Amino acid sequence: MNKGRLEAFSDGVFAIIITIMVLELKIPAGNSLKSLEPLLPVSFSYAISFIFVGIYWNNHHHTMQAVKTVNGGILWANMHLLFWLSLIPFATAWMGENHFSQFPVTLYGILLIMNAVAYTILIVQLIKHHGKESVLAKAIGDDRKGKLSILIYTTAIAASWINTNISIGLFILVACIWFIPDKRIEKQILK
């Protein structure tokens, strides 16, 4: 099957997720800089989630450039990823509205792990379909960044029971690891 519909549908879902998140940002009650203070936790949770969604969109885009076709398993793996991504606005709002308290931060970490696992499943399905010698398989390799991310998310969830600031710092660490565009796929495509 052609990959075009999968890409178009996924891009639409990514756009909707970001739109839902931005609609959660409320207008301040006053007209001074002081009136923005109560919105800082919500704005910060929005910013970090926007970055995570952007990272997934960027990597999804690069991944799709490395493949030629898709099959039913890939379509379902992609839907699985989109499902977990679609829950990010809920966790983002809950975390921001509750000033990064334990349970919202724990849930956010769980959702980040589920997104990482879902993305890994998508990659496995794509490599299975295209073969171990495909451009994507060569580019992904042993996926150290993906495995490290899941380990850091797990640590962040455990840390949320001690101090949620540690968890937020670990989430930011993963975002920093992935923020710089992953060149593995680009390098393989340009060979």
Image (cartoon, rainbow, N blue to C red):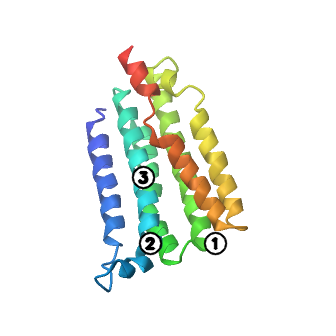
Residue 21: where, in percent of width, then height?
A: 36, 65
Q: Quadrant of the C terminus?
A: top left
Secondary structure beneath disc 3? helix
Q: Which residue is mark 1?
A: 102
Observer-nearest of 56 and 168: 168
Residue 13 placement: quadrant = bottom left
Q: Are marks 3 and 2 in contact (CB under 8 Å)?
A: no
Residue 153: where, in percent of width, then height?
A: 62, 52
Mark drawn on residue 51: 3
Q: Quadrant of the N terminus?
A: top left
Observer-nearest of 183 and 31: 31
Q: In the picture shown, does residue 181 fall above or below 22?
A: above
Q: Are marks 1 and 3 in contact (CB under 8 Å)?
A: no
Q: Which amino acid type is marked by label 2? A: Leu
Q: Residue at x 45, y 65 (%)?
A: 44
Mark toward the viewer: 2 or 1: 2
Q: Which residue is mark 2?
A: 40
